[in-house]
Image (cartoon, rainbow, N blue to C red):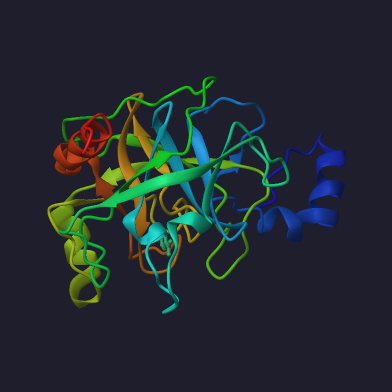
Amino acid sequence: MCQFSRLLVLQLVLCLAFGHIYGHQMPIVGGSAVTEKKYPYFVRLYYENKFICGGSLVRNNAVLTAAHCVEDSSGEDFSVKALSVHAGTINLGDTGVEREIKYAMVSKEYDAETANYDVAVLILSSTIPSASVIPLDRSAVADGTSCLVIGHGHTEEGGVVSNQLQKTYVPVVSREECQREYGDNGIITQYMMCASEPGKKDSCPGDSGGPMICNGKQAGIVSWGEGCGRVEYPGVYTDISKVYGFIEYALMIENIVFI
Ligand code: 4AZ
């Protein structure tokens, strides 16, 4: 952890003094802080004014997130009215642009048990005129591709959310390899893709719903995983290329008037 040249005495002193802190600085898990507004399509999702998930703007009035971010997981009644979206900030302390949700769309294919088809489209109460949107990848990403993941999620397994937006790059792991790793501990369906740098870089609770960006397009949605940053279990993402039809349809419905 503490590597230094003999000349860098100052670095040695700092490392000895603060090494315990550096050692625990594993944002998103194994990432770094975003210091400029480089990802303006990133949004935060709140429920009853509590931060719950990430998301991405795919239209100036529509957000893509995970279905499990908009379901009742607590056993109490879930209300879409209690959801809100904050855009245009990189710190949880900044409100940014806030919108309520007109309605949320989840596919009937979504299964809370397995997290299969973990995708939701949220239509905002009004447009965000300044919104910058992320294009979606219609085609599957090649295994080994290095993809960007951003979020305010836990910075280590069992940790706490990160006030500052974090980013990291994770390589895509094949579905076959991922299923082998999970064994009996999870089903990697055709609607999922996996990525992580084993034991180092990964997404974590709180990153859910946020975007995974490969080659400049959003290819995945943070969905689930066994722990965070573990050697044996990659992070699991909704594969956008497989649920693209649903997203397109959900965005189209928005333009249809039901009489
Ligand atoms: C979660 O519970 C979660 N390590 C998200 C991502 C990962 C694990 C759990 C991946 O939202």
Report which quarter residue 18 is drawn in.
bottom right
Residue at far front of view:
259
Left or right of 195 in this view: 193: left
Q: Nearer the viewer, residue 66 or 164?
A: 66
Residue 235 visible somewhere in the drawing: no
Residue 225, how many percent across, how many down?
Answer: 35, 63
Q: Nearer the viewer, residue 258 or 150?
A: 258
> Is residue 242 depicted above or below 71 in this figure?
above
Which quadrant does the C terminus fall into?
top left
> Is residue 205 depicted above or below 33 in this figure?
below
Residue at screen point 64% across, 34% down = 89
Residue 176, how many percent across, how many down?
Answer: 13, 56
Residue 172, how many percent across, how many down?
Answer: 28, 43
Residue at screen point 47% across, 22% down = 132
Q: How many marks?
A: 0
Residue 69, how many percent across, how many down?
Answer: 41, 58
Residue 80 visible somewhere in the drawing: yes
Report which quarter residue 113 is drawn in.
bottom left
The quadrant where ligand 1 appears is: bottom left
